[in-house]
Image (tube, helix red, strand yellow):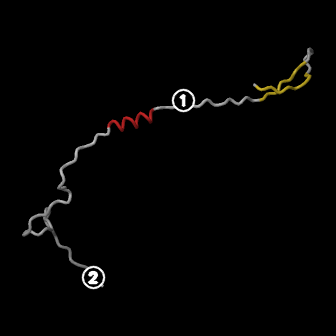
């Protein structure tokens, strides 16, 4: 079982690389020449134009509601009931 170690103090800016060896290459530097950039402005504009195109709403069929009409005689008395589509 380990009881722990000791913490060493370091001065700011001090490195862990050995002083007798030259510094290695950075991991972020590539040996390939930089590639030319591909501009995709036309592609982005085409995508944006598709987003803004609105298709007209489909014509919905209006459901007619059946209503009941009462037919009255000349004296105002109800004679019969008739269903009509309006």
- Image quadrant where one finds the C terminus: top right
* Residue highlighted by disc 1: 56
Residue at image location 77% in from the left, 26% down from the top: 85
**Dot 2 or dot 1, earlier in sequence:** 2
Residue at image location 52% in from the left, 31% down from the top: 55
* Residue highlighted by disc 2: 3
**Is 26 above or below relative to 5?**
above
Q: Secondary structure at mark 1?
A: loop
Please state if 66 lies on the left or on the right of 37 as rendered: right
Please state if 84 lies on the left or on the right of 46 as rendered: right
**Is 61 above or below relative to 78?**
below
**Is 15 above or below relative to 80?**
below
Residue 75 sits in quarter: top right
Cα distance between the residues tagged 2 and 1: 76 Å
**Is 58 above or below relative to 77?**
below
Horizontal and vertical percent position of residue 82: 85, 25
* Foreground pick, 67 / 59: 59
Residue at image location 56% in from the left, 31% down from the top: 57
* Foreground pick, 9 / 23: 23
Residue 15 badge: none
Q: Secondary structure at mark 2?
A: loop
Crowd class of label 2 (few under 14; some 14 to 19; many from 20; radius 10 Å) = few
Horizontal and vertical percent position of residue 70: 86, 23
Residue 43 sits in quarter: top left
Give the label, 2 or 1, closer to the camera: 1
């Amino acid at each position: 079982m380990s009881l722990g170690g000791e913490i060493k103090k370091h001065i700011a800016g001090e490195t862990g690389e050995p002083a007798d060896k030259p510094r290695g290459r950075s991991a972020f530097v590539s040996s390939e020449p930089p590639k030319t950039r591909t501009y995709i402005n036309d592609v982005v504009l085409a995508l944006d134009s598709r987003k803004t195109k609105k298709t007209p709403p489909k014509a919905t069929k209006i459901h007619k509601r059946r209503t009941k009409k009462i037919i009255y005689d000349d004296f105002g008395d109800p004679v019969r009931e008739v269903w009509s589509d309006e």
